[in-house]
Amino acid sequence: WILAKLFRMTATEIEIDVASFTSLARQISASSPDSVVITPTHRSFYDFLIISYICFVLPELGIDIPHIAAAFEFSNLPLLGWIASSMNAFFVKRDGKKRDFSLKQKLTSIMSKNQKPSFLEVFVEGKRSRNRSFVKPKTGFLRCVA
């Protein structure tokens, strides 16, 4: 309800490719994977909210609300950190070339306590594009999932 109200207040139109989600749901039910990594482009601040909202309002797809990999800095923001945590976010420390050694443990914990498959959402660009262009992807997170 809160997200629907937020979207109505701040956006004139949000376009969703429901056919792609339906196709994903069919592929998941046919192959029964341990985990599914959803990797939308991060061109808008709403991206992580929209994916969770779709999974919530369309339960017939069978796609659980994903656990969102978010930058550790978000955990310190008063309202946004709470919203992200309540929407299945887990926080990852990013620092250029340094690795977040607790990431593998966080992923193992998420995948072991959930029913199969576990749904993860990550923005492989690492950060949102300020000018809505595509940013070169980073692969560290995906290496931990594999």
Image (cartoon, rainbow, N blue to C red):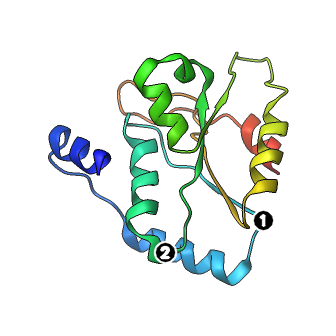
Q: Which residue is mark 2?
A: 61
Q: Residues within 10 Å of mark 2 (few under 14, many from 20)?
A: some
Residue 40 locus on image (x, y percent): 50, 49
Residue 38 locus on image (x, y percent): 58, 54
Please state which amino acid type lies under the numbered disc 1: Asp
Q: Residue 116 or 71: which is nearer the viewer? A: 116
Q: Is residue 78 above or below residue 16?
A: above
Taking the spot 84% from the left edge, 38% from the top edge, the residue there is: 105
Please state which amino acid type lies under the numbered disc 2: Leu
Residue 63 locus on image (x, y percent): 55, 67
Residue 2 locus on image (x, y percent): 29, 45
Q: Quadrant of residue 133?
A: top left
In the drawing, does residue 20 fall left or right of residue 143?
left
Q: Is residue 9 above or below residue 92?
A: below
Taking the spot 48% from the left edge, 44% from the top edge, the residue there is: 41
Sequence-wise first label, 2 or 1: 1
Taking the spot 43% from the left edge, 27% from the top edge, the residue there is: 80
Q: Quadrant of residue 96?
A: top right
In the drawing, does residue 96 fall left or right of residue 43?
right
Q: Residues within 10 Å of mark 1 (few under 14, many from 20)?
A: some
Q: Which residue is mark 1?
A: 34
In the drawing, does residue 95 fall left or right of residue 130?
right
